[in-house]
Image: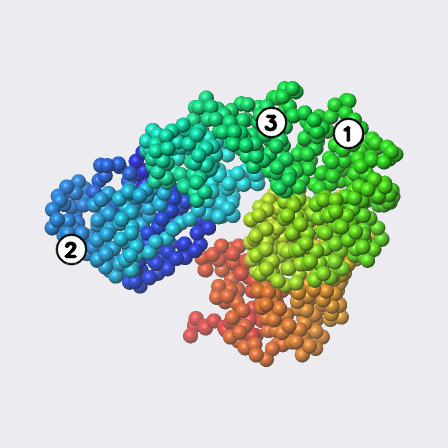
Amino acid sequence: MTQTRAPEKRGLVSLPQASSVTPVVGRDTELERLSGVLERARAGEARAVLVAGDAGVGKTRVLDEMAGRAAEAGITVVTGHCVDLGDVGLPYLPFTEVLGVLAGDERFAAALAAHPVVERLLGAGTGGVRDVDGRLRLFEGMAGLLADVADVAPLLLVLEDLHWADQSSRDLLRFLLGRGVLRHRLAVLASYRADDLHRRHPLRPLLAELIRLPTVERLELRPLGDSDVVRLVRALEHRPLPDATVRRIVERAEGNAFYAEELLAATDTESGGVPGGLADVLLIRLEQLSDTAQQVLRTAAVAGRRVEHDVLREAVGLPEEELESALREAVGRQLLVAGDDDTYSFRHALAREAVYADLLPGERARLHGAFARLLAGRGRTAESAAERAHHYRESHDLAEALAASLEAADHAQRVGAPAEEQRHLEAALDLWPAVGPEARPSGGGVDRVTLTLRASAAAAHAGELHRAVSLSRSALAELGQDAGSELAARVRYTLAGNLLSVDSLTAAFAYSSEALGMIPEDPPSRTWVWAAATHVLAARHVGENETALRVARRALGVAERLRATDAQADLLISLAVFDGVGRRGPQGRERLLKARDLARSSGNAPVELRALFNLAMGYYESGALAECVPWLTEGLDRARRAGLLSSPYPLEMRYLRLLVLHVLGRWDECVRAAATDAEVLPTAGGYTVGPALYVALARGDLAAADRARALLEGPFDWMATLVAGIVLTDAAALRHDPEDAVRWMRSTVAALSDEAVPRPGATVRLAALALSAVADAAAGLRLTGDEPGARRWTDTATELVELARAIATHGEDGAPQGPEGQAWLARAEAEWIRAVSGPDAAAWSKAVTAFGYGDVYERARCRLRYAEALAAAGRREEAAAEARAVRETADDLGATPLREQVDALVRRGRLSDTAGTDHRVGVLTAREQEVLRLLALGRSNRQIGDELFISGKTASVHVSNILAKLGASSRGEAVAIAYREGLITPEPSASG
């Protein structure tokens, strides 16, 4: 077996090869297809694959991966590289490299001796192959040699960078692929850069000819998806990177793996721009253009990624014929792409950045000024405001840039684009001190403080909650001594509202108190009403319930007198949620419906969304899942139309929608919806991935725990902490690790607790999940006679169930929790009884009934325990019926661990007459059967690992899985069950 990896020669440009440790991401389909080619090659039915893709997209990395896989499979791998040597290329260079490797392998000495003509390609002897007959003999000799080598051992021939291949190499490749050499155990993988193939490139006719051959196929490596680039960046960088940094790399790389690696490498050294090495690679193609074409490209780079033809013509100042000739050259070299709407755009954004960075400062400012004047002369439309602001700023006309930025922000607000509005407002704030008072916009109450408040609101609507806090703090710092009390109050209640959104509750209450104290209730004003509405929320969150209700009722009356319908709606929502039984009761729903209508009539979308979320949540908490869905649909549709999908209440609705799909057992829908949400809202964390992680874990994906743990990185996020805690607690319970389960349960409850809510409602669920692992531990120790050990866990179980009882009975609002909370309490009670005295059928029957409100998976998990309790009580037929129901649900959901657990129960309790030995063995994987055999021989985990060539840790995981599947609490019990059930047979005696 031979594998060669020759150093790559790139001529004037050097593109680093992917290192051997660089992961391959986003190429599963392509690798599977190429693996099929290798398998057919080993069987003598080989093919050639032409692998196309832009420079840096990952062709070499994919070929390296396939070469490695081929070598591991016993296939000889030889690689030939084409090199950019301009017009003086060395003939047959890649094949000369291949022959040099084959000549150094003793296995192929006879094959080489049988074809002496090919020795002309070795060393410097290439000059003798000039006449037609000589070329034909050489080509036939090369074909015969490769066939003979492939007869000795399967052969993979890799040819890299065909776009640089010399004419002789192209001719030889045409001959080899057209003359049936692929009938042998030979596969050919050849790569080329698609973006280098201009219309007159000499490789184009050869490719068109080869692709028509039945044994040749083409594989295009397209740019990676954004999620794959994120995976690549995270895998390459072991230190934690801020989400914003990763997003910026993903946006700029546009799916190109090499660009992503270069941008990542430059994160410590450059604050912006294109890394120097990458810029050199990108500019080399520009330098191959004519002077006129370079001038056009530089002008287009100032315009941006895309430019209209007539604007470019006026900016560059060339006659139409010269411009068209230059554009044709740039398009032919695949630097520009022509659009259908008479526009041109750069093929890749980083190419534009590199060309732009190469401009001289004066040249850059002059061209920006030209574009700004051209756009202004065409009409000051709202759509062009953002472009004008950019060009004016870069041309140093700051007054015009400020005016255009504010105009662009107004337009973004009108079309419901809060992220863009925030960006333009922050640009205006940066420009404000550099523009004299006489040149600033006048009238309309525009000043630095109000602009900062507006930017804060836009950030909150865009989901940038911490940025919203920062901006509102800046507004507070900007307030002068002569600021009016109304403005001072507005700044403080805005800051309080933003602090509530990031769970800084005590500070929020302090600022809302200040705001309310700064302005009198009489005469009534909208500012006082909104200060009161914010104070109501803050007071409620710090446990000042009486204050919240008193202020809400008083403020509602003032809002009604002022006809401030949006504030009236907001206060009605607070009363609906805080008063009496809250949003679950008829009075609460009536208030929420009225609030929804008032908010809609006033045009206040954020308040309308708050009403819709609470309507949906009220139905969910009541166990009315079907009635919950229409309100979520309406709310998310309204958020989409308002451009507020990233704001807090729509994020809550997205999570609730996914949760409802999960609870109803519509898991595939849940996973698809979560994937879509994650693409649209990549930074939304637990809101978009939570229920999908619940599905993944329930389906046996142990990596779900790692993804959940990653949610805890970075600043505290309440929802991410909740999701991670649920997944990690349940994962620990599934692997029978009570210590870890209890640890995650306690740490999550502590993280989610605060002064106002010392014990969050989710504690009941977390306690029930941890109790599952605790009960397993107590039951297992009791079976082995370890009463002290069992008693330690029963004490823990009692502590956890008492906590669950207290919270389920007196929830966050002091009232008993709804059907979901009561169901989790029923499960916690049943697990506690199992820990203390063993399985109790009545307790588990109650839990099954409690989850009947609609939670398909949790009901099935309780039915499994119910079946176990019935079997222990001798009620075998009832137990068998329950087990069959659990198995059906597990199969419908794809919940493999649950299916394995019920199968283990059926075996242990002999609940199925049809469960024969073959079925039992099928439950264990082939590897687990090997581990079980060694367990029976008394091997330790380390010894099992040594014998099976796996780590001791991996062996331990297999042992744990075996114990779980057999329902055993110890290694000895597992072996006893295996012998009894016929899963293993005694080893033959060595003395026979």
What's the mark number on residue 488? 1
Residue 792 in the image: above or below residue 275: below
Asked if residue 832 lies left or right of residue 121, the reply is: right
Q: Residue sitting at 49 percent across and 45 percent down?
A: 229
Asked if residue 177 lies left or right of residue 803, the reply is: left
Q: Nearer the viewer, mark 3 or mark 1?
A: 3
Mark 3 in CB contact with mark 1 (< 8 angstroms): no
What's the mark number on residue 114? 2
Secondary structure found at label 2: loop
Q: Amino acid at mark 1?
A: Ala
* The C terminus - image quarter: bottom left
Secondary structure found at label 1: helix
The crowd level at tag 1 (other Cα within 10 Å; few <14, some 14-19, many 20+) is many
Q: Earlier in the sequence, mark 2 or mark 3?
A: 2
**Residue 741: percent from the left, percent from the top?**
66, 54
**Residue 172: percent from the left, percent from the top?**
21, 50
Query: In the depicted view, which residue is nearer to us: 859 or 805?
Result: 859
Secondary structure found at label 3: helix
Q: Earlier in the sequence, mark 3 or mark 1?
A: 3
Q: Residue sitting at 68 percent across and 25 percent down?
A: 442
Measure the C-alpha gap from mark 2 to mark 3.
Answer: 80 Å
Mark 2 in CB contact with mark 3 (< 8 angstroms): no
Residue 200 lies in quadrant: top left
The crowd level at tag 3 (other Cα within 10 Å; few <14, some 14-19, many 20+) is many
The residue at which mark 3 appears reads as 402
Q: Amino acid at mark 3?
A: Leu
Query: In the depicted view, which residue is nearer to us: 984 or 487?
Result: 487
Q: Amino acid at mark 2?
A: Ala
Measure the C-alpha gap from mark 2 to mark 1.
Answer: 94 Å
